[in-house]
Image (cartoon, rainbow, N blue to C red):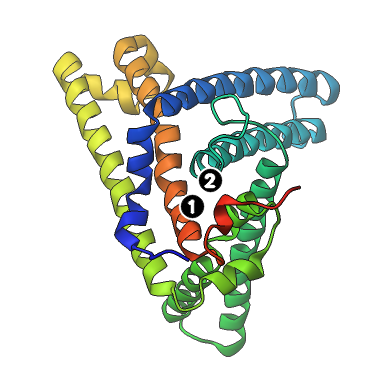
Amino acid sequence: MTEFSASDAALEGFHLIRRRWRVILGWAGFTLLALVMMVVLSAVLSVVATAVGGGGARNPVLGLASIVVLCGFLFTQAILGAGVFRLEMRPDEPAFLHLRLGRDEVRLLLVWLITITGGWVLGWASTLVGHAVGAGGVWLELLAAVVAIYFGLRFALAAPISFAERRIDFPRSWRLTRGRVLGLAGMSALSLCLIGLVMVAVLVALALTALGFGGLSGLSGIFGGREALQTHPGIFLLAFAIQILLTPVLWTLGMAPVAAAYRAFAEPAGEAAQPSAG
């Protein structure tokens, strides 16, 4: 076990981007390619669903097509998330731009789905308890939020564990985080603040650029819909390119800190660097 610093862990994403910025640029290209594939897949499935079951809102084939597209989107995000972990924990593992689709990505996706389901169950249970005891809505929601944050921090290492140790093991995360909740809370809060600052800085820079080239109407190129592509195509394409580039940057800033925390907490020392075979 190595010494854990909440501030150092929160900044790990920035350090990783500085060291491997070429890889992050490559991930932006992967994000664009995945987006194009999702758009094409969605269009094809929509045409097929309409031809088979009609254009009604209750078309089961159209619903199945939506699920397929959603799964494709989730796998894309899992590939990026696992890519960050691979850079941090297994940088020598063979993979194109450190990205691949395999068991590591499937496990990571399952961890996310289990976590989301657990959060939904907790919210549903708090609502039932509130109706049963007649407790005040605001206080009950506040208590539920505190409990959700606590459990979220205790199980925060389940994602890097699924990658480093090649198994889904929520109890392992619970054991590793015992007595370290405050440190993880500080890391998470600082990480979220830094991510927010990056997003605000990018948005302000983009808005100033739009104002400089198109005046007040140029802002529609950022926040507008289809009309923005016709009225301000340059600004629209610039905003689109920045969104594509920002996607892997934000994933790196969000995932690298938990990888750093896992490496600091894993016992015995060096365990994170020596994953089990599987």
Relative depth, front residue between 149 and 111: 111
In this rendering, does residue 220 appear at all? yes
In this rendering, does residue 121 appear at all? no
Picture coordinates of residue 249, whole percent (x, y): 40, 35
- Mark 1–mark 2 distance (CA, rounded to whole Å): 8 Å
Picture coordinates of residue 203, whole percent (x, y): 26, 34
* Left or right relative to 91: residue 110: right
- Count every numbered label the image shows and give the total: 2
How dense is the environment of label 1, judged by Cα within 10 Å: few (below 14), some, or many (20 and up)? many
CB within 8 Å, label 1 to label 2: yes
The furthest residue to the bottom? 133
Identify the image quadrant of residue 240: top left
The furthest residue to the right? 52
How dense is the environment of label 2, judged by Cα within 10 Å: few (below 14), some, or many (20 and up)? many
Name the residue located 58 percent from the left edge and 54 percent from the top edge.
159
* Left or right relative to 14: residue 92: right
Name the residue located 47 percent from the left edge and 78 percent from the top edge.
137
The answer to whether residue 68 is above or below residue 1 is above
Picture coordinates of residue 73, whole percent (x, y): 61, 34
Name the residue located 54 percent from the left edge and 57 percent from the top edge.
270
* Left or right relative to 209: residue 277: right
Query: Which residue corresponds to mark 2?
Result: 89
Identify the image quadrant of residue 219: top left
Q: Residue 35 carries which label?
A: none
Relative depth, front residue between 191 and 102: 102
The answer to whether residue 210 is above or below residue 67 is above
Relative depth, front residue between 252 and 87: 87
Name the residue located 42 percent from the left edge and 52 percent from the top edge.
257
The answer to whether residue 134 is above or below residue 62 is below
The amino acid type found where label 1 is placed reads Ala
SS assignment at label 2: helix
Query: Which residue corresponds to mark 1?
Result: 259
